[in-house]
Image (cartoon, helix red, strand yellow):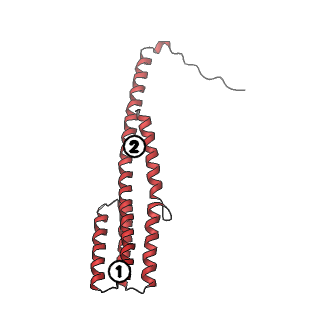
């Protein structure tokens, strides 16, 4: 597989990865925002305490940190936050219906977050492959340029310089 073909296929892969990530309204990021809104609306509609609002704001903070800083430890931190939330729901004696509904929404968020982490890892890996392909293409181009220059160097006396004639 030629370096240019490799570059092209990796670039196409990168485009797919970035499209899958999406933005605030689409893709994995949009999905997380949608679930966040569902959680927020559920907490408001059910008159749950500020504790739950703070928890989901922490989830959102972890998402932003992941996106901005590519800090994969945010997945572990989110998983720990969710375990803490589930423990706190037990301590706070939340009724089974609400507990189940919150758990389902939080689990959806957790799954989407993990998918975003994997997508960002793929993006980083693909970017490295693209940079490597570009480096190899540059080496080949430099080699061809040097070879061509060396061939011309031996035939300087045969080269004629002509200036372009002015156009009327």
Left or right for 160, reference 153 = right
Q: In this view, does 157 lie above or below 23?
A: above
Determine whether the residue tagged by mark 1 lies in a helix, strand or loop: helix
Compute the Cα span from label 1 to label 2.
Answer: 46 Å
Q: In this view, does 5 lie above or below 86?
A: above
Q: In this view, does 96 lie above or below 15?
A: below
The residue at which mark 2 appears reads as: 130
Residue 136: x %, y % from top left: 37, 35
Nearer mark to the viewer, of 1 and 2: 1
Residue 55: x %, y % from top left: 34, 77
Residue 99: x %, y % from top left: 35, 80
Question: Which residue is drawn at the image coordinates 39% and 68% (left, top)?
Answer: 108
Q: Is residue 110 above or below residue 93?
A: above
Tag 1 and tag 2, C-beta contact below 8 Å: no
Determine whether the residue tagged by mark 2 lies in a helix, strand or loop: helix
Question: Which residue is drawn at the image coordinates 42% and 18% (left, top)?
Answer: 151
Question: Which residue is drawn at the image coordinates 39% and 55% (left, top)?
Answer: 119
In the rendering, which numbered label is found on residue 138?
none
Q: Residue furthest top?
A: 158
In the rendering, which numbered label is found on residue 99?
1
- Counting other residues with Cα less than 10 Å from the Cα at mark 1, is it few (<14), some (14-19), or many (20 or more)? some
Q: Identify the image quadrant of the C terminus.
A: top right
Question: Which residue is drawn at the image coordinates 43% and 67% (left, top)?
Answer: 32
- Counting other residues with Cα less than 10 Å from the Cα at mark 2, is it few (<14), some (14-19), or many (20 or more)? many
Residue 39: x %, y % from top left: 42, 76
**Which quarter of the figure has residue 113?**
bottom left
């Amino acid at each position: 597989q030629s370096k240019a073909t490799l570059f092209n296929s990796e670039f196409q892969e990168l485009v797919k990865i970035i499209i899958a990530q999406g933005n605030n309204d689409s893709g994995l990021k949009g999905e997380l925002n949608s679930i966040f809104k569902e959680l927020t609306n559920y907490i408001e509609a059910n008159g749950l305490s500020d504790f739950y609002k703070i928890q989901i704001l922490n989830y959102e903070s972890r998402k932003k940190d992941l996106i901005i800083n590519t800090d994969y430890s945010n997945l572990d931190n989110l998983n720990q936050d969710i375990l803490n939330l589930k423990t706190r729901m037990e301590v706070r004696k939340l009724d089974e219906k609400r507990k189940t509904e919150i758990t389902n929404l939080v689990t959806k968020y957790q799954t989407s977050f993990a998918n975003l982490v994997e997508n960002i890892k793929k993006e980083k890996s693909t970017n490295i492959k693209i940079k490597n392909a570009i480096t190899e293409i540059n080496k080949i181009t430099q080699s061809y340029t040097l070879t061509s220059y060396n061939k011309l160097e031996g035939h300087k006396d045969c080269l004629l310089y002509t200036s372009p004639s002015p156009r009327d």
